[in-house]
Structures are given as structure tokens and as C-alpha cells.
Amino acid sequence: MSMSAASGLMDSPLRREGRPWARLAEWQLALPLALAFAALFLAPLFLLVGVSFFNDDKITQPGFGSWIKFFGDPFNYKVIGDTLLLGVKTVCATVVVGYPLALVYLDLSARLQRVLLFIIVMPLLLSVVVRTFAWIVVLGREGMVNQVLLSLGLISEPLRLLQTELGLVISLTQIEMPLMLLPLISVMSRLDPNLRDASAALGASRWRTLFTVIVPLSMPGLVAGCLLVFASSTTAFISQTVIGGVRLIYLPLLIWQQSLVVYNWPLAAVISLSLVVSVLSVIAALSYMGRRSSGHLHG
């Protein structure tokens, strides 16, 4: 059979008619996941939006009273800012600690890489409640941190680390570290190892190679890790409550108070939507910055 005949057979009307059926089959395969997504995410979100437009906790008087009550109080703007700032600080801390660990991972042998990867993944096998209460032991007045500092003579009395933002950021950095390292290592392990040798052969120092070659190429993994850490740390109710205590007020704590203590569901719905919109806005900004950096890199 000639090439023209084969080409004509491939573009025959019968084959062209079969393409829509193939696309329909793909949609049928994706339909269960789409229905599960709609049932587990979209439906509760729409219900949350509907509940927020009521004025009373009995959900009998429609109106904008809950929205006016929340955004009419300047204190709530401070809570939103503190919540987002907590996520930014946690992201910065995980990047400072996690990026060198990812570089160390690249220089290890295959066996040691598996060991380090197991150490990174192992905290995910434990409940976040267990990891959070473990940090109470570490950061307490009689904890390991204060005992080490006292034995070294760096401090004269135990530091107060619990119920402080510093202690909360330290604990969240360890808790969220796998979310930063896993996407970062996944991207960096696919980089050509000859790139660093080529950069060194052209006269670049190790630091210049890092900031002009390694960091730009690993940017997709870094951005993905930042998104995961920010979204998780800003909504980490257990860690914020146990480590931060009631002295540090963030949006998840307000949601818990209004929904399970005061039973004001409309106001809790407003706070929840404010948290969702705030976090998604920052995530969208980070994604845009990641796309721009990737575009400059490939453009």
C-alpha cells in the first residue's frame, strides 16, 4: 500500500466520525471524578455562600448583616493580615531550610538519597496532632531548646516560646517541610547534572551557578512548594491553637469560635469565605510570579 493510500485511509470519513466518540469516552472516564469534585467541594462552597447571606444565627432573616458585621470591625482586618503574614513567614522559613536540604539531596549517593527521602516522608505518616504536641515538649520552659541554651550559657532563664509567633513559625516550619521538599526535589532531581560542570567550565563560581542556573531551573518546584506550604500553614487550626494559644488569633480560630462556640453560622460562613478568598488571592499572585519567571527563563 502506498503512502498516499495509507494517508487517505487514516483521514477517511469513518475515522473522522470516530474521533468525537473517542473524546466522549474520555469525558465518561473523567465524569466520576468531576461528580465527586462537585459533591465534595463545589456543593459545600455554594452552601457556605448561601448561609453567609443571613443576618441571624437562626438562619431565618436574609440580608447582608453578617458581612457588614465582619468587615465593619477593624480588628478583623488585622486578623486577616496576621493570618496571611503567618503563611508568608512559614514559607520563608521552609525555603531557607528546605532549599539547602534539596541541594544536599542532589549530591548524595542513590542509597543515601533513599534514606533522606524516607526521613522527609516519615513525618507525613504521623498525625499532625502528634507532631504539634511533640513541639510543646520541645519548646516548653523545661523543653529541649531551653535546656540546650541554658547548658551553653546563652541564656540565664528559660525563653518563652509557646504561645508566641516565633514558636508557632518554628513548629510549622518542621510540620510543613515535606510539602516544600517533595516538589522541590522532584524538579531538581530531573536537572541535568552536567549543567553545574558546564557553568564551572565557563568560569562561574558555585554561588553564581546556584543563583543563575540551579535556582531558575528549579523555580517550578519552588513555587509549587511555596503554594502548598502557604495554603497549609494559614489553615493549620491545630498548630495555631495548640502552639499559639488564644493569645494569637487567626482566621481558623475565629471560624471555630463562631461555628462551635457561639453557633453563629452566618458569621462563620463569612469568615470562612474571607479566608478562602484571601488565601486564593495570594496563591494566584504566587502562581503568576512563577509563570512570569518561567516565561523569562524559556523566553
Image: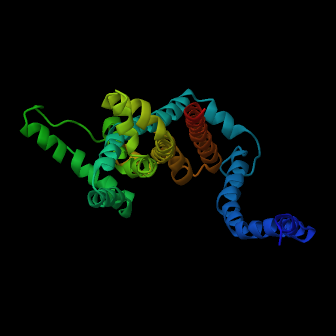
The correct choice, above or below, for 45 with respect to 37 in the image is above
Residue 248 can be seen, yes or no: no
Considering the image in quadrants, where does the C terminus appear? top right
Residue located at (11% from left, 31% from top): 154
Quadrant in the picture for residue 139: top left
State left or right for residue 104 relative to residue 17.
Answer: left
Closer to the camera, 190 or 267? Answer: 190
**Outermost residue toward the right?**
13
Dividing the image into 4 quarters, which one contains the N terminus?
A: bottom right
Q: How is the image coloured?
A: rainbow
- The number of callouts visible is 0
Percent position of residue 71, x then y: 63, 32
Residue visible at 53% across and 54% down in the picture: 260
Relative height, residue 279 to residue 32 (above, below): above
Identify which residue, 267 or 20, lies in the foreground.
20
In the image, taking residue 25 as reference, residue 286 lies left or right, namely left
Q: Nearer the viewer, residue 126 or 73?
A: 126
Q: Is residue 2 visible?
A: yes
Q: Is residue 23 left or right of residue 159?
A: right
Residue at the front extreme? 2
- Residue 102 percent across, percent down from the top left: 35, 46
Above or below, 215 against 27 in this view is above
Q: Position of residue 11 (x, y in %)?
A: 87, 64
Q: Position of residue 49 (x, y in %)?
A: 70, 48
Q: Which residue is at 12% across, 34% downward?
A: 157
Most foreground residue, 265 or 251 = 251
Up the image or down, 207 lies above or below 256; here it is above
